[in-house]
Image (cartoon, rainbow, N blue to C red):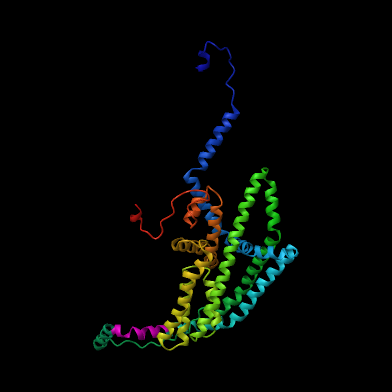
Amino acid sequence: MNDRSLDPTTNDSRPPRYDIFSSGVRWRRELDSVATSPWVICIAVILLLGAIYVASNLLIPLAIAVIAYLTLRPAVASLCRLHLSQTTATAIIILTFFSIIAIAATFLYAPLQQWLSEAPESVNRLREKIGQVAEPLTTVDRAEQQLDTATSGLREEATEVTVSVEKPNIVDPSYLINTTGHVLSFIAAIGVLTFFMLCNGDDLLNRILMVLPDEEQRDQILETITDIQDNVGRYLGQITLINIALGIAVTGVMWLVGMPTPYLWGAMATLFNFVPFIGPIAGTVIVLIAAGTTFDSFSNVALVAASFWLTTAVEGQFVTPAILGKTLKVGSLVVLVAVAFWGFMWGLPGIFLSVPLLIVMRQVFASFEATYPFAVVLGEDPCMPGQDCEPIQEDEPIAELV
């Protein structure tokens, strides 16, 4: 029986009214509880990572274009102050940038192709030199070989087999020819995206801001986006100039130690130094292998590699921290995780984009109060502007902090 019929004070036999407002509130609360569920967040993150991995062919050129836009936007703004139109200033910057890349690629193509063809021989010679250095340590191995030779008469006579070994190649020339068109289209896509971002990026941003009804909110978002563009663009511009200066220094050092085509190793140092910690180590290994072809003495080979590593170490420990200050204050573990993550997601382009993307993410996270803790993990100051807090005790074990 309905409980309403037992109430003597009412004669209303109509069914109870459905409260739409209270039901809507309950529905929104349920949606909010579902949206904040850890399982929902985990599923959303997995779906996002899957989309980044699957759409790599689209996202890689777009990410490079965005980073180029942030880097080149101050230069375009400087030209616009000279009473040039934004399209003209963008065309000048893009043509200058790609002309420099084309000239550098023209000069580096021949020595790079020669080194790739001689790389297998370089590895064999370096192996022989390392064997000569380690020869005093192989006395036990030689004694074991002599013992095997002395007892070989008791074994069955082995059948002589003739083996023909073909000289390996590091890179198949046909592969390079087949991928040339793909590389050129990839570069063209980046150039077109960057051109239109520099020409129409500000206009698109203004149109998006005009959609927002609150003027105070528009000003706040515009200030945040401007800070992100300025800081990220300044960092990328400074680190590019530092890496170019490092390439010039490495070219001089390689010329002094007698390494052929020193400008090739300077260009490699410039490119590899965009990946801190890992890039200089990889460059040192490559120089060590390449020096095995030029020098007969292992001491000379080691001297060339040590000279390359020392030059990059001086830049990494003194020059970059002095110029950038806290801009590149990112822990080595965070950098390694970022390189591994983006390398897995996007391959070789992801490795070179890992640190710029890391800096961009840190700046974006630091611009919003809700995501500021993530920025602290990526190297941002734990004290927000106008906030009093204890600084992080760096380079101290956790046991000493407790």
Q: Which sits in the foreground, 380 or 364?
A: 380
Residue 171: in sight, yes or no?
no
Q: What residue is shown at x 60% (from left), y 29% (from top)?
A: 20
Query: In the image, residue 214 lies at what x, y percent?
Result: 66, 43
Query: In the image, residue 126 lies at what x, y percent?
Result: 42, 83
Query: In the image, residue 91 lies at what x, y percent?
Result: 71, 68
Q: Is residue 133 magenta?
A: yes
Above or below, 220 relative to 111: above
Residue 111: in sight, yes or no?
yes
Residue 44 lies left or right of residue 96; in this view the side is left
Q: Is residue 112 magenta?
A: no
Above or below, 400 relative to 163: above
Q: Residue furthest top?
A: 8
Q: Which sits in the foreground, 304 or 15?
A: 304
Above or below, 234 relative to 252: above
Q: Main secondary structure of the magenta part?
A: helix
- Total labels: the figure holds 0
- The part of the chain drawn in magenta is 126-138
Above or below, 388 relative to 57: above
Figure quadrant of residue 150: bottom left
Q: What residue is shown at x 47% (from left), y 87% (from top)?
A: 294
Query: In the image, residue 332 lies at what x, y percent?
Result: 45, 63
